[in-house]
Image (spheres, rainbow, N blue to C red):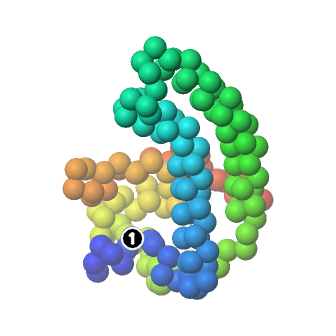
């Protein structure tokens, strides 16, 4: 078994249209994030190129950044939760995964893990994976376990 087969990456299982959609959405969100920094970048550019006289820099910064930053903050605080809610409700492609052929024993043998600990973490909502400098798993800790009574 190679390391690549045990690392779960299902991107290649998505249809091309969904890959393009998520790539375009990611690029759009990054461009929006960079756009939010535009006022600050413009101010730094004008300071560095000395387009603003030294005695007017503080007034010029206050006039150009204070209102824009507040407007951007309100915009981001109102639009971001809406975008995240819409993205969480999209029907995601669920292709049969090639990783389903592996069992807990395969992961225990490959990563030298404790089987009982791995099975305990498999039913957790939050698992912390500790690893060494080479990326090898050292320890697993589960913080929030799902019990059969609380899962329903």
* Up/down of 138 relative to 89, above or below: above
**Residue 61 place in picture, x, y as percent:** 54, 24
At x 53%, y 49%, the residue is: 34
Residue 124 visible at all: no
**Residue 16 place in picture, x, y as percent:** 56, 85
The image quadrant where one finds the N terminus is bottom left
Report the label total: 1
At x 37%, y 73%, the residue is: 6
The answer to which of 69 and 5 lies nearer the viewer is 69
* Up/down of 8 relative to 51, above or below: below
Q: Is residue 63 left or right of 40 when viewed as pictured? A: right
**Residue 60 place in picture, x, y as percent:** 55, 23
Secondary element under disc 1, as helix, strand or loop, is loop
- Specify the farthest residue to the left: 134
Q: Is residue 146 left or right of 110 when viewed as pictured? A: right
The answer to which of 20 and 152 lies nearer the viewer is 20
* Up/down of 4 relative to 39, above or below: below
The answer to which of 28 and 146 lies nearer the viewer is 28
At x 56%, y 81%, the residue is: 14
**Residue 121 place in picture, x, y as percent:** 50, 56
The answer to which of 24 and 5 lies nearer the viewer is 24
Badge 1: few (under 14), some or many (20 or more) residues near its Cα, within 10 Å? few
Residue pointed to by mark 1: 7
Q: Quadrant of residue 5?
A: bottom left
Residue 11 visible at all: yes
The image quadrant where one finds the C terminus is bottom right
Q: Is residue 50 left or right of 64 when viewed as pictured? A: left
């Amino acid at each position: 078994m190679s390391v690549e087969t045990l690392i779960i990456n299902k991107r290649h299982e998505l249809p091309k249209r969904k890959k393009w959609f998520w790539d375009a959405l990611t690029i759009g969100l990054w461009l929006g994030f960079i756009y939010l920094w535009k006022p600050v970048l413009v101010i730094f550019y004008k300071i560095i190129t000395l387009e603003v006289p030294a005695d007017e820099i503080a007034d010029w910064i206050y006039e150009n950044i204070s209102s824009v930053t507040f407007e951007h903050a309100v915009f981001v605080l109102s639009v971001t939760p809406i975008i995240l809610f819409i993205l969480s409700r999209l029907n995601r492609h669920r292709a049969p995964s090639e990783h389903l052929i592996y069992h807990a024993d395969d992961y225990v043998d490959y990563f030298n893990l404790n089987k009982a600990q791995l099975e305990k973490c498999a039913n957790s909502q939050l698992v912390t994976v500790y690893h060494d400098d080479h990326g090898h798993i050292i320890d697993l800790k589960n913080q929030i376990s799902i019990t059969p009574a609380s899962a329903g």
